[in-house]
Image: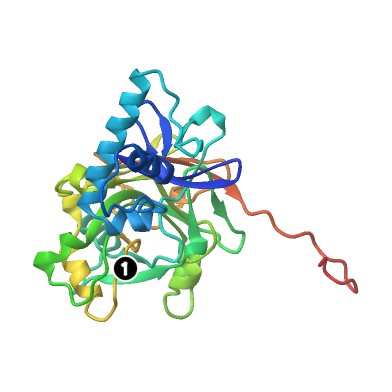
Amino acid sequence: MKLVHFTLADQFHFGMITDANEFIDLDTACRDYYGVNPVKGADPSRFRDMQQFFQGGADSVELTKKILEYVERRRKMGWTPRAATGARYLFKAEEGVKLLAPVVRGGKIYCLASNSRSHLAEQQKPAPAQPYCFTRFFNSLVGPSESLVLNPAGTFPDVELELAAIVGKQGKHIPAERAMDYIAGYTVALDMGYRDLQYPAAGAADWVMGKGFDSTMGVGPWVIPKEEVGDVYPLKMELKVNGTLRQAGDTTDYVFRIPQILAHLSTGITLEPGDLLSLGSLGGVPGFEFGNESRKLKVGDKIEAQIERIGRLVMPVKAEALPPAVAPGTAPPA
């Protein structure tokens, strides 16, 4: 089950991609399903967005399976899948569907640093005593139909593949043994940053400038519910740039796993449906040490990231469009 956010003719939809590569608006389809199959007390608007889907937990997954069966029955009867109101809810990719990042706007983003043994080894660093996190904001996120963007302020852009988990329900002081109850699903994350800005020649590490620029974190192409992924240790992970292997390994390389991380963060932070937890980078392929010049990204690069049982995220790299220069003595354009 591939859960997505997408637009068509600038209209936002929450839904899923079928095995036939068609897009279902789950909000509209759910209303149609309950219109034909009424259930006392059921909420036909429960799929307005991914956050509401997450809040439904396993029940949302089971209801979606019933909706898919209903759609297939209608197909076999020769019906066009339209809701009772006449609203259409089935779309094809060639109609101009644009995939967005499958995350909830306003959700918190936590990224793990120094969280794989191979990445620590290539930096010659010891493992931290507890999960070491930094935060990102929504401005840095881009989806599968967009590009990672290079800003001229940074001279050493780099990219890393990470497994990301999506929080499914609110919680605080979450014990590690119950932490997986709070996870809704998983997606692929590309963490792009600027090594020179993150680690300036003088001064302390600067995570905001190194990792917080616009359009530097790719997420997608979809969220797979945890019920369908199962145990995420191990999952194979692979990153290529222009066809050249950059990273290869699996999730058993992570130092801290999801239960430990959620327990740590929720000690003082209320986690909410839609919050994203990116588990950190693996090391590079053998001989590809941290800081190697060949690791720099450039305009026109093609990044391919794949995580077993979750999906493949492909994103191009482009330059930021800078504002036009203003002549001395003139006012900037309004």
Q: Secondary structure at mark 1?
A: loop
- Looking at the figure, which quarter contains the C terminus? bottom right
Residue placed most toward the observer, 66 or 4: 66
Which color mode does the image show? rainbow
Residue placed most toward the observer, 275 or 233: 275
User: In the orientation shown, which residue stands out farthest toward the right?
Assistant: 329
Which residue appears at 39% of the width and 44% of the height? 31
Question: Does residue 99 appear left or right of residue 245 in this picture?
Answer: right
Could you tell me if residue 222 is visible in this image? yes
Residue placed most toward the observer, 48 or 318: 48
Quarter where residue 199 is shown: bottom left
Does 278 sit above or below residue 232? below
Specify the amino acid type for callout 1: Glu
Which residue appears at 41% of the width and 46% of the height? 27
Q: Tell me how many marks there are.
A: 1
Question: Does residue 323 appear left or right of residue 24 in this picture?
Answer: right
**Residue bearing the label numbered 1:** 272
* Residue 121 position in % (x across, y down): 23, 59
* Residue 224 position in % (x across, y down): 29, 45
Does 331 sit above or below residue 94? below
* Residue 60 position in % (x across, y down): 26, 49
Could you tell me if residue 279 is visible in this image? no
- Looking at the figure, which quarter contains the N terminus? top left
Question: Does residue 201 appear left or right of residue 278 in this picture?
Answer: right
Q: Residues within 10 Å of mark 1 (few under 14, many from 20)?
A: some
* Residue 66 position in % (x across, y down): 25, 37
Which residue appears at 18% of the width and 72% of the height? 263
